[in-house]
Image (tube, grey):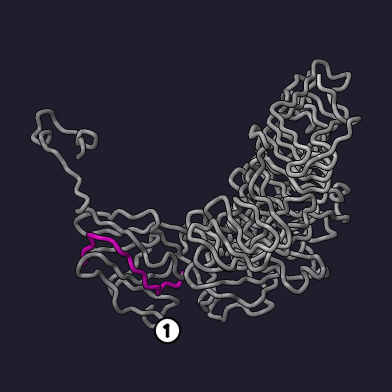
Amino acid sequence: QLDIFDYFEFELDSNHTRLTYVYDEDLTPYVEWISRKNGTTAGGTTVQLVGSGFTQNSTVKLAGITCATRYEDIGSYRDQHLCDWDGVVCDGIGVSDDGTTITCLTNPWDYSGDAFDREVIVEVEGQGYALTADTVVWSYANLWSSTTTWGGNDPPVEGDSVVITYGEYIVLDISPPELVLLTIQGNLKFAHDVGDLALNCSYIVLHYGRLFVGTADEPFETYNAVITLVGNRDSYELPVYGAKTIAVRTAELFLHGRHRVSWTKLAETAGVGNTTLVLRDDTDWEIGDHIFVSSTEHQMLQAEECYITAVSSDGRVIEVSKPLIYEHWGAGWTSEDGLYDMDGYRASVGLLTRNVVVQGDHVYSKAEQFGSQIVFSTETNTEDNPLTGMLSNVEVRQAGQGLKLGKYPIHFHMVGNVSESYIKNCSVHHTFNRGITVHGVDNLLVEHNVIFDTRGHTIFTEDGTERFNTIRYNLVAVVRPIWSLLMVDQSPACFWIVNPTNDVYGNVAAGSSHYGFWFRALPEPDGVSGQANADAGLSRCPNWSELGKVEDNTAHSTGRHGMKVSNFFPVKDGYFCPTDAISEPATFKNFTSFKNRHMGIWGEFLVDVSFDTLHLADHTKSGIEFKYINGRSAKFATTLITNAVFVGNMYEEIFTPESEKCALR
C-alpha cells in the first residue's frame, strides 16, 4: 500500500485524495532466470528468459540491443540474414502460452558502450517494464571457438600470439593449443558451463584489460580451470615481469575458485601408522584432495603429505592414502593440576587442492627451479588502486624462480594503495622462491591462505614502506633456506615483517629452518621503494613506527625461534621520523610457541616493547630471551611480560641439578 501523496500532487478536496492504491506482486512481470549470460557479438544466439507475467507482445533488449521474439525483428550480420548462417536456429522464438518463458534470438552488437554485464530489459505491453533479478545480466562476447571471433578464420593454433583488443570481450569456451604471448587489452572470461578448461602460454600480459576465471559473486565452481605458464631459463624476459608470467599492468585479474575450507587443526592425536585424522572443524574436503599434516616436533620435516581416501559427512573424520610415519599431536596440553593449558599445541592440517590452478609447466619448473609468476606492477603508484588483483580459492604450484630476486609466485610490486585487492583462501605450495610478496604496497588483504614447502621468507613484506596491510589466519609450513636471494633468506621466516604498522594476527607458522615470525624493523626503507624515497628527499623510519594488531599467532617446529623481534623503538607517528619522539609503547599479544629448537621469543635492541599472554613450551634453550632492551638512553622505557606460561617440557620429566635451580624467595 502506497501513500499517493509521496508520488503525486492533487488539488485540495480532489476525489483522487480519497483513493488507496495497493501494489499487487502478481500483476508485476518478473524475470527470474536467463539461460546464458553471454553470446557472440555477431548475434544469432538463442536465449531463454524465465519468469512470470509475460504477454505475446513482450519485447526484450539485451545491453540495449533488441533480442528478436519475432522473425521480422531478426537482423543481419555481414550483409547476410542471421537465419542464413550455419548453426543459427530461428525456429521456436516467442513467448510461451502460459507467459512464463520468452525465447529470443540475439541481434549483432553495435559496439556502443560497454558490453560487459549489461542490463536485461523486458517490456510487457500495457504493463510497463518487468522487474529483473540481480543475477540476470547479459554480455556481448565472442567465443574463442567461433570463426567469427577471428574474422572468419580458424581459432589460434599452437605457437600463435594473440591480442584481445580494447573493448573486446571473448569467452574462452575451449582449451586452445599452447600459445606464446596472450595480450589482454579487452576482456577474457573462462566459460562456466563447458567443462574443464586449460590455458597454456609462455606469457599472459594484461594491459588495461581484464581476465576472469570466476568472480567473487559467481566463482568458477563446477569444473577445473588450469593456467600453465611454460618456459625455461633461456626464455626472453619482459622488463619488470620476466618470463613465464601473468603480468598485470594497470589491469584487473579475477581468479575465484570454488570455496574450500583452507585449513584446520587436529582434534585428536594421530599416532605413527594411523590412516585416520580427526579434525577440529567441519570441512568440505573430498576424496582425492591433497593435504598435509604439520609437524608437532622440533623437526619441521616431520610434516607429511597425503591424499584423502574417505571422509565423513561433516568432514571432521578423514582417511588418508598412507600410514603416518610420525606422531602428530592433536590434544593440546593441560598441566597436571589443571591450572594451565595450551590449546594451540596441536598439528595443523592444510588443504592444497583447488579447482582453479596457476602453475609452472611440468618440463622445466622443477628441473630448473624455474616456475610460474603472477606479477602485479604498474607505471604509477600515486593513485589508489591503479590495478586490481582479486584471488580466492586458487592453487599456485611449481611457482617462483630460484636464483632470481623478484621472481615470486604471487608478487604485488610497487603499486601503492591496493585496498580493493586481496589473496584469500589460496594454496601456494612446492615453490622455488617465496610464497606471497608484498612490496611497496599498502592495504592489501592476505587471509586464510595455506603455504607449504617454500624457499626463503614466505609471506614477505620487502622494503619497510609497506603499511596497513592485513595478514591474518594464514598457515605456513616447511620453509627452507635459499642462498641465491638476500642474505637474510639464508635464515628464513614463515612471516617476515619489516614495518611494524601492519596487522598480523591469527596466523600459524608451522615449521621453518629458522624463524616463525621475524619482525625486523629497518632504520630506513631499503630496496627500490627506499631508493624512491631517498630520491624524493623523504625521510622514513620503519623502526619507529607504531605496532599494528599483532596477536593470536602461533609458531612451532622451527630451527631457531618462534618469534624474533629486533630494532624496534615505537614512537607516535614514528614512520615520519619526528624530531620530538613521543613513546608509543607496543605490545605483542597472545603468542603461542612450542617445540622450537632455540627460543620461543628472541628480542634484541627493543625499547617500550611488551609481551602479554604468552604460552611458551618445550624449547631447547629458553622460553624468552632478550639482548639490549631499554638501554641507558631510553628514559622511562618499560617492558612488561604479563600473563605468561612457561613450560620446560610438557610430557617428559625434567631433571634439574640443585646447582641450577632458582632460589625461592
Instruction: Say which quarter of the image contains residue 536.
Output: top right
Task: Judge from the rendering whether residue 608 lies leftward or rightward of residue 658; answer left or right.
Answer: left
Q: Identify the residue shown where x is 85% and y is 53%.
A: 485
Q: Identify the residue shown where x is 19% and y is 48%.
A: 24
The relative height of residue 338 versus residue 200 in the rendered view (above or below) is: above
Q: Position of residue 531 (x, y in %)?
A: 83, 41
Q: Position of residue 612 (x, y in %)?
A: 70, 29
Q: Position of residue 282 (x, y in %)?
A: 52, 53
Q: Residue furthest top?
A: 636
Q: Which residue is mark 1?
A: 86
Quarter the C terminus occupies: top right
Instruction: Say which quarter of the image contains residue 160.
Output: bottom right
Task: Judge from the rendering whether residue 29 lies leftward or rightward of residue 545; answer left or right.
Answer: left
The relative height of residue 91 versus residue 565 in the rendered view (above or below) is: below
Query: Looking at this view, is 328 or 608 the one in front?
Result: 328
Q: Which residues are magenta?
A: 41-57
Indicate the secondary structure of the residue bearing disc 1.
loop
Query: Looking at this view, is 416 or 554 the one in front?
Result: 554
Residue 45 is inside the magenta segment = yes
Q: Identify the residue shown where x is 56% and y is 64%.
A: 188
Q: Look at label 1 and name its amino acid.
A: Asp
Task: Judge from the rendering whether residue 621 lies leftward or rightward of residue 646; answer left or right.
Answer: right
Q: Position of residue 434 (x, y in %)?
A: 76, 54
